[in-house]
Image (tube, rainbow, N blue to C red):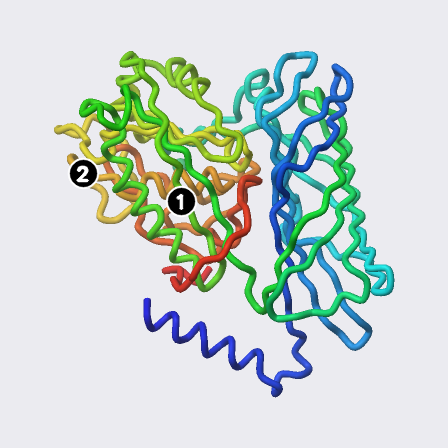
Amino acid sequence: MRKAAAVFLVVGVLVGGAGFAQQPLTYYLTGNIKEATGTVATDKGDQRTSFLGSIGFRVVPTEKGLLFYLFDFNLISKGVPTGRGDSGPISVRLADAQGKSMTYDPRSGRASTEFAAIFHYELIDRVKGFRQVRGQAEGDLFVPFTETMTGKMSVRFPEELRVVDKGTTYVDLDLTLALSTSVLGSIQRISLITRVIIDWTRLFSPAQYLRIQPVFIGTGPTDGTATGKAFPELMKRATELWNRCGSVRCIKFVVNEPIYINNSAYKVLETAAEADSLRAEVSVTDAVEVFVVDRMDFACSWGGGACFSSGTASAKIVSCDQQLAVPSPCPCTWCPATCPPCPPCQTGAVNYYHLAHELGHALNLDHPGQPYGLAAVTAGSNMEPSGFCCDNPNVQSAKNCRNASNPLLFWGTALCVGTPNISD
Ligand SMILES: [Zn+2]
């Protein structure tokens, strides 16, 4: 870790040095959209709701002036009433990972762009279900149907904006999003006007955080029989694996205090339908819920845990304490050849990197070679499926780090010093 930090600093000094004058420096302006009130046009009329989100601009100074690119845009809301019922969490994210160039007038500070956005709300899952990935592997990935929107963004920075290495400024945001491809079509349009405080950084974009909401079964933190005993270890391993993105991209988790559901019927899930009921018990707008039960009778078909509505604000993970207590003999027949040291299938404390894998799905990552509309990943990495009796590989890749996305990601500061095991 110490060595990686030293390399990071040396690179910073070299690129920032005067000897690289013809190499354009890149600056970033990033900030979080907080409690911005917007209008959502639905099949039940216009609804007002408040939005959270994030925005990021890449700024490249050239001889002709500043070039602006919109490289990050996420929007989330707890939802609005529609003709088919409550929408549940709404999420919007930029479709193009490369970002979009913007027109920019330095005198007025005005900039604008059009972009495609991935659009989703939980009602789509309830009405249409999921596109579950089927194959020989564990079925732990329930991919949502998503819609697309065309976004028109007009922004105004302060007049005569100058790039600086550090500091805070603002941007006034005028945004409209119109539905362009429909799955359910209950929401047609979103419009929003707000001011966002944004921070300058140079060379590398700052840290992005994903909030995690653990949900356990029991009466509360003093309940010795409550579920969730495996969660701290699983979360520790997930944090450690994703910290390895550091030299490519800084992705961090922030974990809320657990929520307890006082209904012991959920301790053992007998059917997938029971897991559906469990998922409906808790929805936290700005977090990925991680439900941890004691065990599930269908653990073999999910690898003991699964992620629903990947890559959206509705993403939820259902897992179990048996990840670290796989029964003996191993109850499942499928163990992947791609996941050393498996086979053979194992029992006991096995699936240390299972939650890291499911959080990868929450971050819109696929399994290798399974293009179900989620982002591509590296073969042999943690995103390999593994089954219940064998761990997901303890291997992070630069591609997985780069391709991770979720509209719940927000900007923050952190020290990022890790390096992926695979450079792509
Ligand atoms: Zn998976």
- Front residue of 395/254: it is 254
- The quadrant the N terminus occupies is bottom left
Q: Is mark 1 within 8 Å of ligand 1?
A: yes
Residue behind mark 2: 349
Quadrant location of residue 125? top right
- Front residue of 95/284: it is 284
Which residue is depicted at the point 51% across and 53% down?
Answer: 412
* Cβ atoms at labels 2 and 1 below 8 Å apart: no
Q: Amino acid at mark 1?
A: Met
Q: Earlier in the sequence, mark 2 or mark 1?
A: 2
Q: Position of residue 215 (x, y in %)?
A: 36, 27
Tally of numbered discs: 2
Q: Kindly state the secondary structure of the residue where label 1 is placed.
A: loop
Q: Position of residue 17 (x, y in %)?
A: 58, 83
Q: Position of residue 89 (x, y in %)?
A: 58, 27
Category of crowding for the residue at label 1, using alpha-carbon neighbours closer than 10 angstroms: few (below 14), some (14–19), many (at least 20): many
Which residue is depicted at the point 64% across and 73% down?
Answer: 25
Q: Kindly state the secondary structure of the residue where label 2 is placed.
A: loop
Q: Which mark is residue 166?
A: none
Closest to the camera, between mark 2 and mark 1, is 2
Q: Amino acid at mark 2?
A: Ala
Q: Quadrant of ligand 1?
A: top left
Q: Is residue 34 above or below residue 81?
A: below
Residue behind mark 1: 383
Which residue is depicted at the point 31% across and 31% down?
Answer: 303
Q: Is residue 322 above or below residue 15?
A: above
Q: Is mark 2 within 8 Å of ligand 1?
A: no
Is residue 338 visible in the rendered structure shown here? no
